[in-house]
Image: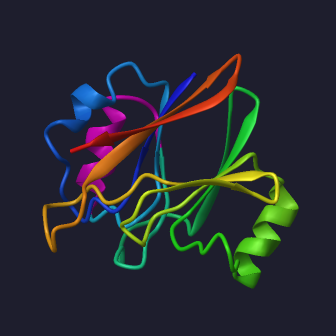
Amino acid sequence: MKIGIISDTHDYLDPKIPELFKGVDHILHAGDVGSPWITFQLEQIAPTTAVMGNTDQGLTLKESELVELDGRKFLVHHIVDPRELSDTVKERIKRSKPDVVVFGHTHKRFCQILRGILFFNPGYSGKQRFNLDRSVAILQWQDQGIQPEFLPL
C-alpha cells in the first residue's frame, strides 16, 4: 500500500502533486489545508483524510483523525512535538495505539521512530517562501518494513 503524505499547503496545491501522488491508495493531509478546494483536488487523486491546522479557521475538519490502512493505524494531528508530547497528543496515542503519527506545522521534514511509533512530517508544500524546502512524501510498506520517500517540489 502506498500512502501520500502532505501538510501545510496553505491554500496552494503545487501542480506537480497529482503526478507525484499518482498510484497512491490514500492521502493523509496533516493540516493547514487552506480551503476545501485543496481537499477536493486531492480527492480526485485518491481518498483523502485531512485534519485542521492552526490556520484553518472556518473549515469543518477535526483536530485529529485515526485512520486504519492495510492493518496499520495512522494518527493524523497538525501540531506534534515528538520529543515533548502535549497531554492531548499523549492521550490520543495512549487510546488509539497508532503505528504512525503524521503531523505538520513545523514546515520541516521529520522521520523517526520514538517509543515504538513512527513520527512523520512530510515538510512544507505551500507556495515558495522564506527559502523553505518544499516537499511531500510517500510511505509504503514492503517486506523489509516501511519505506518513507520524501519528494521535493
Residue 104 spot, x, y in % from top left: 46, 64
Left or right of 57 on screen, residue 139: right
The image shows residue 61, relative to residue 86, as above or below, that is above
Q: Which residue is at 81% across, 52% downward?
A: 116
In magenta stretch: residue 37: yes
Tell me which colouring the rendered structure shows.
rainbow
Q: Quadrant of the N terminus?
A: top right
Q: Which residue is at 25% across, 55% downward?
A: 134
Q: Which residue is at 56% across, 69% downward?
A: 63
Q: Quadrant of the C terminus?
A: top left
The image shows residue 127, relative to residue 57, as above or below, that is above
Left or right of 124 on screen, residue 16: left
Residue 24 spot, x, y in % from top left: 43, 25
Left or right of 145 on screen, residue 81: left
The image shows residue 110, relative to residue 24, as above or below, that is below
Q: Nearer the viewer, residue 13 or 124?
A: 124
Which image quarter: residue 151?
top left
Left or right of 31 on screen, residue 78: right
Q: Nearer the viewer, residue 49 or 1?
A: 1
Q: How many marks on residues?
A: 0
Residue 43 spot, x, y in % from top left: 36, 36
The image shows residue 84, relative to residue 135, as above or below, that is below
Residue 139 spot, x, y in % from top left: 53, 34
Q: Which residue is at 40% across, 29% downward?
A: 46
From which residue to which does the magenta span run? 35-48
Q: Nearer the viewer, residue 61 or 141?
A: 141
Q: Nearer the viewer, residue 136 or 110?
A: 110
